Image (cartoon, rainbow, N blue to C red):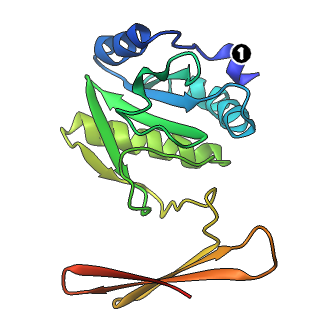
């Protein structure tokens, strides 16, 4: 239902106009394929929150098959990506994933998505180009099952979809370098 009701940006010109013309509200664009299950789930949630965020955000959908013009520029290689713009400026958000440019997993919690959109909007109004997510949101969709951190190291456990085993990746930060080892 969300994919049908929310406004679609049919061409690159429409995407540009949506980003350029909105002066007061945050522009939220879901890039993906309308028939993709992840996009359908995310569109439902976006539809459910659209009324609650309408005073500070406007939500659009853009099908990557219809409008491939931004795939390379915005690195739209994931099945579903949400990007944020304010007054013709790309807004970034630190979700704790290392990719501050976009949200590229399905959020299931309405209030969490509202909080993220509101935080980005408030930061944008203050002139910030990068804000920190209101919650420690991590990329669960790509398979990160748990995150354990201390001051010297970071361990990410990612469930293997083919077996009952887990793939363990250790990231150890020493001085200014990051070392990654797969076990």
Residue 56 visible somewhere in the drawing: no
Residue linked to disc 1: 4
Q: Position of residue 75 (x, y in %)?
A: 41, 39
Question: Which of the 4 image quarters holds residue 176?
Answer: bottom left
In the rendered structure, the answer to whether residue 87 lies left or right of residue 163 reads left
In the rendered structure, the answer to whether residue 102 lies left or right of residue 81 reads left
Q: Position of residue 33 (x, y in %)?
A: 64, 28
Residue at image x 28%, y 16%?
23
Residue 76 versus residue 27 in the image, above or below: below
Residue at image x 23%, y 42%?
129
- The secondary structure type at the circle numbered 1 is helix
Q: Position of residue 36 (x, y in %)?
A: 72, 33
Q: Position of residue 181 (x, y in %)?
A: 46, 84
Residue 176 visible somewhere in the drawing: yes
In the rendered structure, the answer to whether residue 166 lies left or right of residue 156 reads right
Closer to the camera, 151 or 33?
A: 33
Residue at image x 39%, y 88%?
153
Residue 151 versus residue 133 in the image, above or below: below
In the rendered image, the quadrant that contains the N terminus is top right
Residue at image x 34%, y 32%?
73
Question: Which of the 4 image quarters holds residue 101?
Answer: top left
Closer to the camera, 169 or 15?
A: 169
Residue 166 versus residue 137 in the image, above or below: below
Q: For mark 1, does the 10 Å Cα neighbourhood hold few (<14), some (14 to 19), or many (20 or more) residues?
A: few
């Amino acid at each position: 239902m969300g994919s049908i009701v929310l406004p679609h940006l049919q061409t690159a010109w429409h995407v540009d106009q949506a980003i350029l013309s909105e002066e007061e509200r945050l522009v939220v664009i879901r890039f993906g394929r309308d028939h993709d299950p992840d996009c359908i789930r995310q569109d439902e949630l976006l539809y459910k929150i659209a009324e609650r965020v309408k005073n500070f955000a406007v939500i659009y959908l853009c099908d990557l098959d219809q409008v491939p013009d931004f795939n390379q520029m915005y690195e739209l290689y994931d099945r579903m990506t949400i990007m944020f713009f304010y007054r013709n400026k790309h807004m970034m958000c630190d979700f704790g994933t290392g990719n501050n440019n976009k949200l590229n997993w399905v959020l299931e919690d309405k209030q969490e998505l509202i909080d993220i959109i509101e935080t980005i909007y408030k930061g944008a109004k203050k002139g910030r180009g990068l804000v920190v997510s209101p919650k420690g949101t991590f990329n669960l969709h790509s398979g990160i099952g748990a995150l354990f951190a201390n001051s010297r190291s970071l361990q990410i456990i990612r469930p293997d979809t083919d077996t009952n085993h887990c793939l363990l990746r250790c990231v150890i930060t020493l001085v200014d370098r990051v070392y990654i080892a797969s076990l």
